[in-house]
Image (cartoon, grey):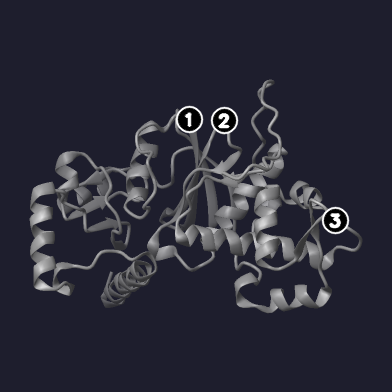
Amino acid sequence: GGPTGELGEASDRKITRNQKRKHDEINHVQKTFAEMDPTTAALEKEHETLTKVKYIDRVQIGRFEIDTWYFSPYPEEYGKCSKLWICEYCLKYMRLEKSYRYHQYECTQRQPMGDEIYRKGSNSIYEVDGSNHKLYCQNLCLLAKLFLDHKTLYFDVEPFVFYILCELDRYGSHIVGYFSKEKESPDGNNVACILTLPPYQRKGYGKLLIAFSYELSKQEQVTGSPEKPLSDLGKLSYRSYWSWVLLEILRDFRGTLSIKDLSNMTSITQNDIISTLQSLNLVKYWKGQHVICVTPKLIEEHLKSAEYKKPSLTVDITALRWTAPPKKAHKKHKNSTSAH
């Protein structure tokens, strides 16, 4: 690309640095040596020498060079590189730019593995079974760990299904983010891990992934909740999504609704509904029960605030090509009301 391409890339890089700075401030991420006082820096350097953990500082994926946030257990010789090159289609990782350039020329893949189950405008979602595409899913988990603090699963991908969100253009399907989901969740989780890659954050994709996970639960006729612990960013996104969904229903509904009714309508668990309504001050505890108490004025006030406005991207259920897998006979998943 000419000068415009380079300018675009430079600004892409800058965006991710600023995002990381904001992210660091929220999550109290460690300072660099230059930002520390000399004694602390010396101790930190010594500690680093002793532990010999070399972090991958940056990854190139498609047109983005992204600063990483956390450690990820890439195999020895890869984990010691300061920069990894990753094919945005098959997610193969490489140490050298020349291997990456050669791979780009050689790789025939232009979309994620698995089946496309949703397409709306320039967005599509692919369903990838961890048992059928083990290497691809392992590569996805290693990449995700660079941006997720709590993630623990990298190699045991068979019990999971992965839902990959992409932006489409004439070159192919570019990975934007994903969520994973256990095939059989004893705790009733409908999301195990969820991530939007940094260059695509703050564009409504996280909420789209969350909404999509609940659409799948509705099709399965179960309630679901994300696996804990959630990252700070995850907590904010979920709370905002839950609030918007519940406020929209309560605004338009005439008559009385119980928390169980809301749960059946949305596939959000009763626990998550109660905690959301409490945060919105729309529930009272009366005679051992949670009772919804709303006034149209209160609802409208909430809906005016930026936090609960309609997400910029929503799921168009008519664009979903998916049927729930047959239920196993032994598995009757009750709405969990115990706090996890």
Residue 253 sits in quarter: bottom right
Q: Are marks 3 and 2 in contact (CB under 8 Å)?
A: no
Q: CA distance from mark 1 to mark 2?
A: 8 Å
Quarter of the image with the N terminus is bottom left
Residue 221 sits in quarter: top right
Q: On screen, 219 above or below 57? A: above
Indicate which disc, 3 or 2, sits on the residue closer to the N terminus.
2
On the image, the x and y values in percent for residue 206 come to 52, 59
On the image, the x and y values in percent for residue 225 come to 60, 46
The crowding category of the residue bearing disc 1, from other C-alpha atoms within 10 Å (few below 14, some 14 to 19, many at least 20), is few
- Which numbered tag is attached to residue 184? 2
Q: Which residue is mark 1?
A: 159
Q: Are marks 1 and 2 in contact (CB under 8 Å)?
A: yes
Three-letter amino acid code of the residue under disc 3: Leu
Q: Is residue 157 left or right of residue 328?
A: left
In what element is the residue under mark 3?
loop
The foreground one among 28 and 311 is 28
Q: Are marks 3 and 1 in contact (CB under 8 Å)?
A: no
On the image, the x and y values in percent for residue 139 come to 33, 41
Quarter of the image with the C terminus is top right
Instruction: Residue at 8% x, 52% y: name it.
Output: 49
Is residue 122 visible in the rendered image? The answer is no
Instruction: Residue at 19% x, 67% y: name it.
Output: 32
Indicate which disc, 3 or 1, sits on the residue closer to the N terminus.
1
Q: Residue furthest top?
A: 329
Q: Is residue 303 left or right of residue 172?
A: right
Pair 3/1: label in front: 3
